[in-house]
Amino acid sequence: MRIDILTLFPAIAAVPLGESMIGKAQQRGLVTIQVHNLRDWTRDKHRMADDAPYGGSQGMVMKCEPIFAAVEELKTRESSDESAPRSRVILFSPGGRRFTQKIAEEYAQHSHLILLCGHYEGIDQRVIDHLIDDEISIGDYVLTNGALAAAVFTDAIVRLIPGVLGDENSASDDSFSSGLLEFPQYTRPVEFRGWRVPDILLSGNHAAIAKWRREQALEKTRRVRPDLLPNDTE
């Protein structure tokens, strides 16, 4: 998989994605992540990537020319073979569809993603109408820029690539993968400050442990995120 991130603030995305499992995945060749400065595709001496909005309003709007130039060049770099899988262009903005684990699993199957990070008051609507394939929001709140959202999105999908996590079953056990929040986890010591690990986890009875974990996951989901449960879940 190749992921190209277009942003006005490259370090915000590049630094976290160079650490931990995502950094190791890149070192091992499981994914290629390139963070690009959108200003590299501007043509004026001041490298302006934004301008005042038509019609009057506060703030600035990202210009369409450098965005189109960048995306079109990155698509060309990826492949000149017309039969190759098509690149997907994703914009991060509060107006997009809410990001979920299901969407992460969907995008983990693609070979090339171009992630466009919104900033300021938004992006020229012609980009949204004629260039992007999907608009994603990572939550119902507003960030100072989309590079943070791009880093979150990238982390969520790259960890689903086979070989990135140490245990192949880790991703399938995550919260939301089964439609439920994850069950409680414990490790050594067995007792800490009078609080013991539940005896069932020490029993060695794997069927009973699986049943307990399912019950705990259901209980937590009912308490914290009841919206995730269908009415007939037992």
Image (cartoon, helix red, strand yellow):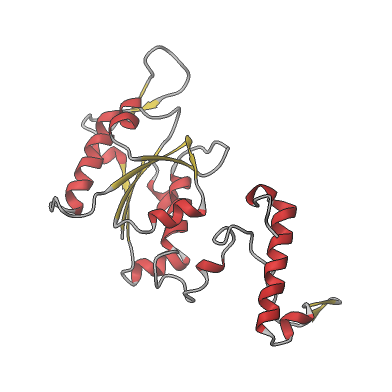
Q: Position of residue 71 (x, y in %)?
A: 25, 41
Q: Position of residue 89 (x, y in %)?
A: 32, 43
Task: Residue at 51% x, 67% y: name it.
Answer: 171
Quadrant of the rendered image containing residue 193: bottom right
Which residue is farthest bottom? 204
Quadrant where the image shows the N terminus: bottom left
Task: Residue at 19% x, 44% y: name it.
Answer: 73
Q: Is 70 drawn above or below residue 62 in the view shown?
A: below
Q: Position of residue 131 (x, y in %)?
A: 28, 35
Which residue is farthest right? 194
Number of numbered tags placed on the structure image: 0
* 188 horizontally vs 147: left or right: right
Task: Residue at 44% x, 57% y: name it.
Answer: 105
Q: Is 50 drawn above or below residue 14 in the view shown?
A: above
* 60 horizontally vs 210: left or right: left
Which residue is farthest front? 232
State whether residue 226 appears in this view.
yes
Foreground pick, 231 / 131: 231
